[in-house]
Amino acid sequence: MVGLIWLLLLGIGVAYALAPEARPRTGPRQASVIRQGDTYLVHYRWPHGGREWEASWHVSVEWLIATERELAELPEVVLENLDRQGIDRDHPDLGLWFWRRAWRRIAALNLDRIDEVVETFRTFKEENGLDDAEIKLLALQFVQSLPYATPEGELGVYAPPQTLVRALGDCDTKSLLYLLILRKLGYDAIMLYSPHYQHAMVGIGASSPGTFIELDGQRYYFCETTQLGFWIGEVSPSVGDLARWIPLRIL
């Protein structure tokens, strides 16, 4: 099993290995994490629109224990699902099929664990008179402000509650968090995955300038989650060959 998982990991989690000029940098963000009984209180500050925004959220210790168990079980659950569908483990697209199902399961299990985060962004929108484009960008810049680092564990990915407590993540970890925030806010969003670039982003269904990819006749605009400085629809030339990207609907 370990050997198979290692092969699957070759397709994700080491973004920009071939593009030194695009490697993520840490933005001017601050975070604090305090244990309070059976919860963690996480507090974040991040830049957007010429000012600093801040928010505090509670993350249940029970959720963290559950996510550890769920991620440990995930490879076996996904591979058994592929076996039931008669998919050969030597198939060249096994990594793609594996990650699509893995991300889908992580998203489904954690959708309700970020309700407090989502409510904060709803409040920001209402109290500051932000339109849809502005709240999408505000949430994106929060996720971008998290330092880039490869998560611990066999799969090299964190579930959203873990991301909030550890205050870091890699491309698919941060993209999963942003995707769930968007979907809970009522926006159409998908995962964008490139085995060639070994990278993941989020695609937002919207009318927007910039770079997009199509799925089922809908345009989805690229959102780079790994570093501050990228706007919705903006893609680094180092990962800019659209033919290398695959749109995946996971929710």
Image (cartoon, rainbow, N blue to C red):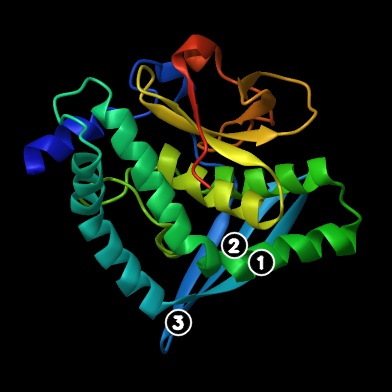
Name the kind of residue labelled 1 in the image: Ala
Q: Say whether marks 1 and 2 touch (CB < 8 Å).
A: yes
Gap in Å between the C-alphas at discs 3 and 1? Answer: 16 Å
Looking at the rendered structure, the secondary structure element under dot 3 is strand
State the residue lying farthest toward the bottom. Answer: 37
Q: Which residue is mark 2?
A: 44
Identify the image quadrant of residue 56.
Answer: bottom right
Q: Which residue is mark 1?
A: 55
Badge 2: residue crowd in 10 Å (few <14, some 14–19, many ≥20) = many
Quadrant in which the N terminus is drawn: top left
Looking at the rendered structure, the secondary structure element under dot 2 is strand
Residue under the point 72% across and 42% down = 137
Residue under the point 67% across and 49% down = 139
In the foreground, 24 or 186: 186
Task: Note whether 182 is above or below 89 in the view shown.
Answer: below
Closer to the eye: label 3 or 1: 3
Task: Determine if residue 231 is in view.
Answer: yes
Residue 14 spot, x, y in % from top left: 32, 30
Gap in Å between the C-alphas at discs 3 and 2? Answer: 16 Å
Identify the image quadrant of residue 50.
Answer: top right
Name the kind of residue labelled 3 in the image: Thr
Name the kind of residue labelled 2 in the image: Tyr
Q: Earlier in the sequence, mark 3 or mark 2?
A: 3
Closer to the eye: label 3 or 2: 3
* The disc label shown at residue 39, or none: 3
Q: Earlier in the sequence, mark 3 or mark 1?
A: 3
Residue 104 spot, x, y in % from top left: 43, 48
